[in-house]
Image (spheres, rainbow, N blue to C red):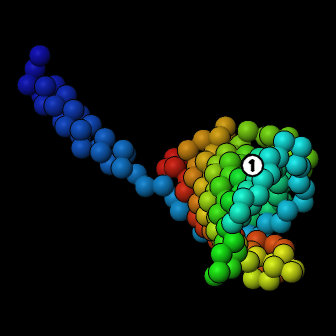
Amino acid sequence: MNKTIRLIIAAFIIFGFLAAPAAATAKAEKIPISGVCWIIGFSGDNIRYWDTNNGSHWRHALWLIQCEYNDPRLPQYILSDDNWNLRWDADGDVAHTHSASISTDDVGNPDNLWQGHAEAQAVALTYEDDLWNLTIHAVMEGLGIYQGYLFTSTWQSTPEGIYLVEGELLIPSGK
């Protein structure tokens, strides 16, 4: 093999090693997200509920939630399987909840585009009106055509019964 061909092959190999880390470390695109969500349905068919001497609890309450975001790739409907723990104490009622969620159509049929989970804490503002200050931290992962996407958000309840949503959508490079 002639020396020039060997130098060309060596140059391609070296260039390949130098270019590979740059491609592997390409950053995801971050898109700021804002929106609003509200509950449009509830099913307690499989719910378990019980009281204790200092609180109440439920498991598997299904909430159908409708959302409007500034990015159409995010789910318009979410079905949340919610688990709630409420503690009564001298400082007021404090609740913690965790849930698993999937994206759905408008009647709760899964569309297999997003799945996730959420953790929340609520403090009763006025027990008589069932008014809560609820803050939710949610993570949804893309499926199917959105595989590799990641949506992280914080939801804040309002007295009007809607949730204000702020977060970011991470889109893998090359998508």
The answer to whether residue 132 is seen in the rendering is yes
In this view, the residue in front, 97 or 169, is: 97
Query: Disc 1 designates what residue?
Result: 59
Q: Could you say which quadrant of the image residue 5 lies in? A: top left
Three-letter amino acid code of the residue under disc 1: Arg
What residue is at 90 percent from the left and 56 percent from the top?
41
Residue for point 49% across, 50% down: 173
Single out the residue that lies furthest toward the top.
1
Q: Secondary structure at mark 1?
A: strand
Q: Position of residue 115 (x, y in %)?
A: 67, 45
Question: Is residue 66 positioned above or below 132 on the image?
Answer: above
Location of the N terminus by quadrant is top left
Q: Residue furthest left?
A: 3
Looking at the image, which residue is at 10% across and 20% down? 2
Position of 120 with respect to 131 (left or right) is left
The quarter of the displayed image where residue 42 is located: bottom right
Q: Position of residue 22 (x, y in %)?
A: 32, 48
